[in-house]
């Protein structure tokens, strides 16, 4: 993933919704328990990781 968080639109203004925001939104929406981690290098999003946890209720068989 190599999108820049401040990509410019045709108007020359920063894009308020860069591509990585959609990826993070989808990963969070599909997650019940876990972590979405965004890695940034030099002000740019370079990686997004999703770790899902499965929880068990010990009182249920």
Image (cartoon, rainbow, N blue to C red):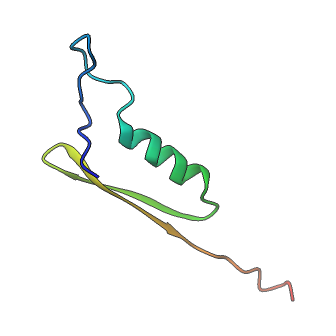
Q: Is residue 18 left or right of residue 55?
A: left
**4 in relation to 45, above or below:** above
Q: Quick one: which residue is furthest to the top in this view?
A: 11
Viewer-nearest residue: 57 or 13: 13
Q: What residue lies at 21% left-to-right and 14% top-to-bottom?
A: 12
Q: Is residue 38 above or below residue 9?
A: below
Q: Residue at x 77, y 86 (%)?
A: 58
Tell me where residue 38 appears, x and y as whole percent.
34, 54
**Residue at the outermost bottom position:** 61
> How many marks on residues?
0
Residue occupying the point 29% across, 52% down: 1
- Residue 28 vertical placement versus 22 (above, below): below
Q: Residue furthest right?
A: 61
Front one among 55 and 31: 31
Residue 15 image position (x, y, % from top left): 31, 24
| In this rendering, position of residue 56 left or right of residue 7 | right
Q: Position of residue 2 (x, y in %)?
A: 24, 48
Residue 10 is left or right of residue 27, and the answer is: left
For the C terminus, give its image quadrant: bottom right
**Residue at (54, 48) in percent of width and height:** 26
Q: Residue furthest left?
A: 42
């Amino acid at each position: 993933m190599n999108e820049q968080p401040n990509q410019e639109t045709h108007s020359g203004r920063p894009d308020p919704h860069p591509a990585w925001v959609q990826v993070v939104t989808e990963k969070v929406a599909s997650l019940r328990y876990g972590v979405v981690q965004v890695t940034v290098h030099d002000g740019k999003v370079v990686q997004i990781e999703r770790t899902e946890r499965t929880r068990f209720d010990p009182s249920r068989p």
